[in-house]
Amino acid sequence: MVESISVLLVEDDYDFRDSCARWMQRKGHRVVAAAGGAEALAICQRNDFDVGVFDMNMPGMSGIELLQRLRDDKIDMEVVILTGQGTIESAVQAMKLGATDYLTKPCPLGDLEHHCRLARDRSRLRRENKQLKAMMTRNEKVTELIGDSEEMRTVATWIKRIAPTSKPVLITGESGTGKEVVAKTIWRSSHLKDHPFLAINCAALPESLVESELFGHEKGSFTGAYADKPGLFEVANGGTLLIDELGEMPLSLQPKLLRVLEDGSIRRIGSHKERKVDVRIIAATNRDLSEDVKRGTFREDLFYRVNVLPIHLPPLRDHRRDVDLLIDHFIPKGWSIDAEARAAMNEHHWPGNVRELINVIERATILADHDEITLDDLPRDLIQAHRLENDATRSLSSRQNDPKSDLLDEVTEAHILAVLERENGNKAKTARVLGIHRRKLYRLLERYQILHSHQDNHEAESIDAAVSSAS
Ligand SMILES: Nc1ncnc2c1ncn2[C@@H]1O[C@H](COP(=O)(O)OP(=O)(O)OP(=O)(O)O)[C@@H](O)[C@H]1O
């Protein structure tokens, strides 16, 4: 099906104008005809067109003058100039003013249609480009990768090595560890930094949309496909595409991604035409894809293709040394944090990683009375864990000075408390980390009377029941 072009035809010669307009309309295009420049300008104020076809020689206002007026009035339209005398000078002048094309009359109407189509495609590309740039500057608050720990330095070294190649990269790590920050850092450090960076999150879109977003579709290929639409692979052509949450990509779509990785071929939904793209693919996931391969939910061949250059981001609890740096980076200018709040943040387990740390700081700055974050401005679980840790340390050190105390008992108690806190009160995990059976952990908790300070009564009762039925 031919895609219609909207054309503003400005021509003083009635016969040519009329026959040209009718012919284009028969071809399915939307044509508005004007007999001169002034009329055309008035029409342009109220309507948008893909292309203007302007006769060069018209009484009153020439085609070139009309083009100049459009540029002055910031009316955005591709323009094809028609002239009876194809002189080089007038062609150069028209092109300098930004005319897309230049045709000598008489010309076959098929040629004119062809040139209009080219102009329309150009206008569409320009518009898309503008939108993308605007989108990118909106999203592009440059975030640098913060971290001075050995773990983060290893990540930075990898980024430096990986960035200059065009090979696919697979970034793994828990949610909130900075996978997207790393992807953008790779892009910004690569030779593709002046080309687009686009991202898609496979988990955020319904299955049916992921394919159309990535590969595009042809008009009419499904309900709601009102126009041809290029996919992100086409839009990012020459640049970098981040496929976030790759582990969530539907199995049915994985062969299509494999083809792009193998030879850069894509096919829009509803099209038989193969297109070639040259896109650097960075994939990210918080899943263990090798496990998904074993489970049969992720294709093995795709895994090997995408896992050429892997980067793993450690969870924040494994590089707590960076917590202070991160606090100092994310705390707003002019704010401070007191020592106790800082200590609590250093002790925390950070299951939500850096994203959680940022949220904790943001929340605290809303709650704090002054420009200083204190312990009371932190979430309750951080405060409680910090107090518990303090109590345990104080009790240990005071009893260490008491010759009658059983030091081994105290050390055991403090250790259990610390692990329990680190595992967010999860006793199954705590027992696993301690290498003891869960029942034994319950007995120890009871013995050290940790139970009632750490658990709610309901849970305590069920644990009591478990302990007594076990013994
Ligand atoms: N090392 C870091 N340095 C600076 N900012 C970081 C770092 N790690 C994470 N962030 C910040 O934490 C937030 C979450 O990071 P990001 O979106 O990159 O995580 P992610 O691993 O992609 O998470 P998800 O898997 O949930 O998409 C962002 O605001 C990001 O700027």
Image (spheres, rainbow, N blue to C red):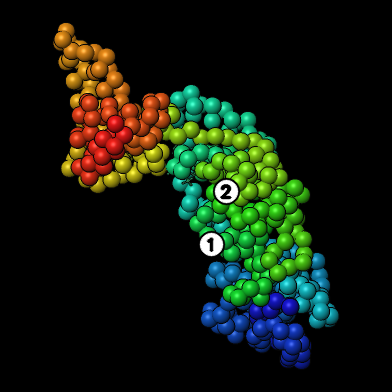
- Assign the C terminus to one quadrant of the image: top left
Q: Residue at x 48, y 33 (%)?
A: 314
Percent of width and height locating residue 259: 73, 52
Residue sitting nearer the eye, 423 or 451: 451
In primary-sequence order, the first of circles 2 and 1 is: 1
Residue sitting nearer the eye, 431 or 394: 431
Check disc 2 and give the amino acid type.
Answer: Gly
Q: Which residue is mark 1?
A: 206
Check disc 1 and give the amino acid type.
Answer: Pro
Crowdedness near tag 2: few (<14), some (14–19) or many (≥20) residues, C-alpha within 10 Å: many
Residue sitting nearer the eye, 97 or 350: 350
Q: Quadrant of ligand 1?
A: top left
Residue 291 appears in the picture as rendered = yes
Answer left or right for 334 relative to 287.
left
Q: Element type at marker 1?
A: loop
Identify whether 157 is placed above or below 282: above
Crowdedness near tag 1: few (<14), some (14–19) or many (≥20) residues, C-alpha within 10 Å: few
Please identify the quarter of the rendering in which residue 338 is found. top left
Residue 247 tag number? 2
- Assign the N terminus to one quadrant of the image: bottom right
Q: Residue at x 76, y 77 (%)?
A: 113
Q: CA distance from mark 2 to mark 1?
A: 14 Å
Identify whether 277 is placed above or below 187: below
Residue 45 tag number? none
The response on whether ligand 1 sits within 8 Å of label 1 is no
Please identify the quarter of the rendering in which residue 394 is found. top left
Percent of width and height locating residue 17: 73, 88
Residue projecting furthest to the top:
403
Percent of width and height locating residue 446: 23, 30
Q: Residue at x 39, y 34 (%)?
A: 429
